[in-house]
Image (cartoon, coloured by chain):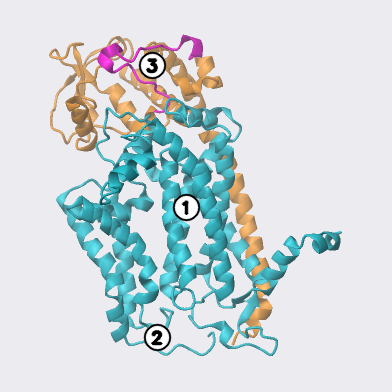
Chain colours: A cyan, B orange
Amino acid sequence: MSDWFNQRMPVFKELFDHLKNYQAPKNLNFWYFFGSLALLMVANQFITGIWLLMYYTPDASLAMSSIELMMREVNFGWLFRYLHAAGASFVFVVIYLHMFRGLLYGSYQSPREILWWTGCLMLVIFMAEAYTGYILPWGQMSYWAARVIMSLFKAIPFVGDSLVLFIQGDYEVSEVTLHRFFAFHVVLVPLIILAFVGLHTLALHAVGSNNPDGVEIKDHVDEKGKPLDGVAFHPYYTVKDVMGACIFLFIFLSVVFFAPRGWGLILEPENFEVANYMVTPLHIKPSWYLAPYYAILRAIPSKGLGALAMLGSILVFALLPFLDRSPVKSMRYKGPLSRMALGVFVVAFIGLLCVGGMEVSPLSISAARICSVLYFSYFLLMPIYTHYDTHKPAPDRLT
Amino acid sequence: MSRFLIAALAIFSWSVVSDAPQYLFDKESQIAAGAQAFAQTCYSCHSMKYMRTDAVSLSGGIQPDQAPQWTEDSWNGHPPPDLSLITAAKGVDYVYSYLMGYYVDETHPSGFENIVMPGTQMPNPFAAMQGEQELVLTDPEVRLFQALKLKNRGAKSPQEFEDYVSSIAVYLEYASDPSQAYREHIGYYVLGFLAVMIVIMIALDLAYWKDIHGDHQ
C-alpha cells in the first residue's frame, strides 16, 4: 500500500529519505535545540491561531469581548488564548537563543551567509507578526503601542506620511487599522513566514548544520561520500529534538497553566482595558521582546536618527558575515577579545531589554545610551578585534 | 486628565495600596459570598458582562437581564465601568485597598474621599456598613491602615467588613480569569505527563546514541 502510494506521490518517501540522508555533525549540543523548537512554536502559533480565528471578531467594539467571552464560554477557549499569547513570547525566547547560538559558534560565516540572512529577515517578519497580532485584542496598550510604532514610519523621508496612510488606512490608528492588521496578521505575514521557514530549511540542507567546533564535516568523507563525523538526522537528531521539545514544553506549559499572564510580560495589565483614544496610558511600553530596539530608539534625542538606529540595530545582524575576520568560526577557538565582545553584547542586549520597558528617566536614558553604544560596538568594531585577536587553531575534525 | 494623573501618582509613587489578605477560608465559598456581595452592593451600577453564563455569578444574583445600563455621557462622561477585568487591569491589591480606602472629607461633594484614587467619582458604597474612617496621617510613605482610622463603627464589625470587602475582591479576581482553578488542576497532569515523557526520551536518546558515543574519540 505504501509502495503503491509512493510510486505515484513520493512525498513521504522523499521526506523520510531526506531526514535519513541528511548528515548532521555528531557533536551538536543543547544550543542546537532552538531551531527545531522555533519550528514547534511556529506550529503552535498556527494551530492555536486558527482556533482563535473561529471566535475572534476584528471589530473595535467586539474585539476584546469576543476574546474574553471565548475564554469563558468556549471549551478550552482559555487554553488556546493563553497558548497563543504566551507562545508569542516564547517564539522570541527561542529565536533569540537560536541567534545567540549563531553568534557563539559563527554559524553566519561562509558558507552559511544566505542561511543567516533568511534568518535575519525572519526576525523582522516575526516582529511584524507580533506587532500586528498585538493590536488585535484592541486594549489600551494595543492601541497606543500601535500609534507609537506607526509614528516611527513617519520618520522615513519623503514617503513616510503616505506610507503610514497606506498601512493604517486612516489618518490615525483606528478601526480600519484593526481590520487591516487582522488581515496582515492572519493571512499575509503567516504566508511569508511559511515561505521563509521553507527557504531557511532549504538553505540549511544545502550547506549543512554548523557545529560547536565550527569545522566542516563535509571536508572528511568516507569512500561513499558520507561525512566521517556525521550522523543521520533521523533517528539520531529526531530523537534528541523530541527530547529537547519535551523539556521545552515543560517550561512553556508551566507558564501557560500556572502564570499565563507572565507577570505582566505576556499580557500587560493595561491591555485589559478597552482601547480609548481619549486617555493616553501614563507609560506606553512595547512587549519585552521589542524593548531592546525601543530602548535604542529612545536613547537618541532625534526621532529620525533614533528610528534609523532602531532599524540599524535589527539589520546590522545581516552584516556579520562581512564583519567577522576570524580565521575560525567557533568561540571555542576564538581569542579573549572576541569572547569579551560577545559577553559585553549579551549584557548590553539584556540591559536594553530591561531599560526599554522602564519609564523615561535621566538614569534609564543614560543606561540606554551606554548599552546602545556597546550594542553597536560589538558589530562595528568586529573587523578590528577579530583581526588582532589571538585565535587558537581549529582542529581538523570534530573533537 | 489632571484627576487621572493624581490617581496615577497615587498608584505609582505612593505606597498606600495594601496587600489584599490571603484567603482566610475556603476559596470557593469566598467566591460565592463575593458574588452575592457584588450583586448586593456593586451590581446596581457596575456591569459584569463577561460573566453572563457563569454559574457562580448567576446563583449569586448577578443576572444579565438586570445588568445596569449607562449612556456614554452619564456621570459627566465617566459612567461606572464594567468590572469583569478590573483586577487584571489594576491588580487585586489595588481593588481591595480602593474599597477599604474611603475616608470622611467634607470638601468632597459626596462627603467622602478615597486615599487610593483621590477625586474618585464613586460615592462611598460602604458608609453604613463600615462606618466612617478619618485620615490621620498624610505622609505619602505610610500604608492604608496606618493612614486611616475608623472614627465610628458601622453595621458590620471591622473584621466582618474586611471579610465582606475581601470576598468582593476575591470574586473580582475570579471573574478576571475563571479558568484558574481548572487550569491549575489539569496543569499538574500536563506537567506530570511531560515529566514522564522527559525521562523516557532521555533514556531513548541515550539508547540511540550509545553506539555513536562509543566511537566518539
Disc 3 crowd rating (10 Å Cα; few below 14, some 14-19, many 20+) is: many
**Disc 1/disc 2 C-alpha distance (Å):** 34 Å
Mark 1, secondary structure of its residue: helix
Q: Is residue A350 left or right of residue A127?
A: left
Q: Position of residue A323 (x, y in %)?
A: 34, 76
Q: Residue at x 25, y 14 (%)?
A: B76
Q: What kind of residue is marked 1?
A: Phe
Q: Position of residue B195 (x, y in %)?
A: 60, 55
Range of residues picked out in magenta: B61-85
Residue that numbered label 2 is attached to: A327
Disc 1 crowd rating (10 Å Cα; few below 14, some 14-19, many 20+) is: many
Numbered tag placed on residue A90 in the rendering: 1
Most prominent secondary structure in the magenta stretch? loop
Disc 2 crowd rating (10 Å Cα; few below 14, some 14-19, many 20+) is: some
Res. A245 visible in picture:
yes
Residue that numbered label 3 is attached to: B46
Query: Front-most of A383 and B186?
Result: A383
Chain identifier of the residue bearing label 1 in the image: A
**Disc 3/disc 2 C-alpha distance (Å):** 69 Å
Q: What kind of residue is marked 3?
A: His
Magenta-colored stretch includes residue A222 = no
Q: Is residue B90 above or below residue A125?
A: above
**Both labels 3 and 2 in a single chain:** no
Nearer the camera: disc 1 or disc 2: 2
Q: Residue at x 31, y 61 (%)?
A: A313
Q: Position of residue A183 (x, y in %)?
A: 49, 40
